[in-house]
Image: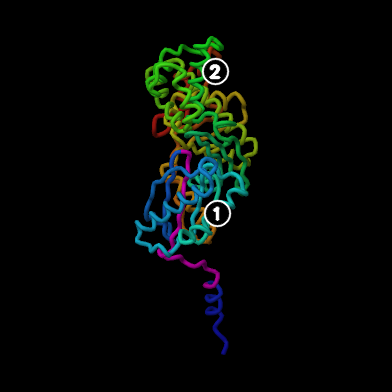
Amino acid sequence: MMMPADVVQEAAISTQIKPQYSEDIRIGGVEGGATHSTLVILDGKGARLTEVKGPHTNHWVIGIDEAAARLSAMIEKGKQNLDIPETIPLDCVGLTLSGCEEETTNRKLVETLLKTYPQSAKDYVIGSDTLGSIRTGLETGGIVLIAGTGSNALLLNPDGKTHGCGGWGHMMGDEGGAYWIAHRACKYVFDDIDGLVEAPEPISYVWPAMRSYFNVNDRNSILPYLYANFDKSTIGEFTKEIAIGCEKDDPLCLKLFEEAGQVLAKHVNAVSKKAHNDLKLAHGGLKVICVGSVWKSWKYMKNGFMNEIHNKRLVDELSLLHLTTTSALGACYLAAEKINCPFAKPYDSNVEIFFHYKRDHYPEMRKTEHSIELKNQTSDCNNAYVHGNGEST
């Protein structure tokens, strides 16, 4: 018997509809920074089920075996939170980790996980921590600029191609990150006391703050922190004291954060040269997701950052955004795509704009003895873009 044409057509359409994944599917995502890591587990419809905190997972620092062990421990803790039996692995886990920029070592980490901890997950997708951040907040592409203990920038174009700048660690990079700021402060003090190079501003706040933070009386006693007992995070934490100095209007602390803003802007300029025009011409201009604790001191970095952007004339408009959630969600999104599990992703609610720059609305600038400052800032405010947090260009 021949089936009616409308029935045949309906049957054909139904076979093209993607299957609806049930809540039984479990997708994980790990955000791994230089100091700590976060795991989020979603169901097959994108609902957030649990979150687990853990130690840092940078395999360049602790080795691939230890990184795999820490990742598996976090996954198992998440499974326990959800009463998932130890023998049942998650369907897929996205890993966006500090230090995961190189394909060969990434593949070795995944192979170690699958072989040593087969109960943790059936499959993995892996990339850098920058990739997780950008996929959390931007659907079509943009830039992520990380300034935590270290620093790193990544451009994701709409065609899926990426271009990076930085991310080389404290020996070869990390400019603008907390470790870089703290180390630079210490270097200013050491050189000034030696008489080798005079610090650009008095060390009257920074030097006592160093002695108090490291609990020492002289520079020799700081050396074990820099060598025998070196811990990048411990050095980086000193940047909090420099931020306190900014609140007290200490000139050297203000200078350090201005320099950090300038060098972070250089990262944006570097990758923006390869950004597609549709990213630059989008509403709000080129989007830059800013991740890391250093951005809490944006008001002290702002002049250095925006003057560098304005002077190089590579970007006519940009918006700086904060994530309103963990970038482990971006890792989850990557894992969901790996197993073809579709669900709506709330990109817009995952970010908020905290600063907007447009060349036509930027004040005229003048050079001072120590820095480039904005001129006529007050008179230009009526023409600037003002945002919900009161920030304006």
Q: Are marks 2 and 1 in contact (CB under 8 Å)?
A: no
Q: Quadrant of residue 43?
A: bottom left
- In the foreground, 273 or 364: 273
Q: Residue at x 41, y 15 (%)?
A: 205
The spot of residue 374 in percent (x, y) is: 50, 18
In the depicted structure, whether residue 71 falls above or below residue 292: below
Q: Quadrant of the N terminus?
A: bottom right
Question: Which badge, 2 or 1, is on the more N-terminal residue?
Answer: 1
Membership of 25 in magenta stretch = yes
The spot of residue 284 in percent (x, y) is: 52, 37
Q: Residue at x 55, y 23 (%)?
A: 307
Disc nearest the viewer among 2 and 1? 1
Q: Quadrant of residue 299?
A: top left
The spot of residue 207 in percent (x, y) is: 43, 16
Q: Could you tell me the amino acid type at mark 2?
A: Met
The spot of residue 58 in percent (x, y) is: 51, 43
The coloring applied to the image is rainbow
What is the residue that sits farthest to the bottom in this orientation? 1
State which region is magenta.
Answer: 14-34
In the depicted structure, whether residue 107 falls above or below residue 386: below
* Residue receiving disc 1: 110
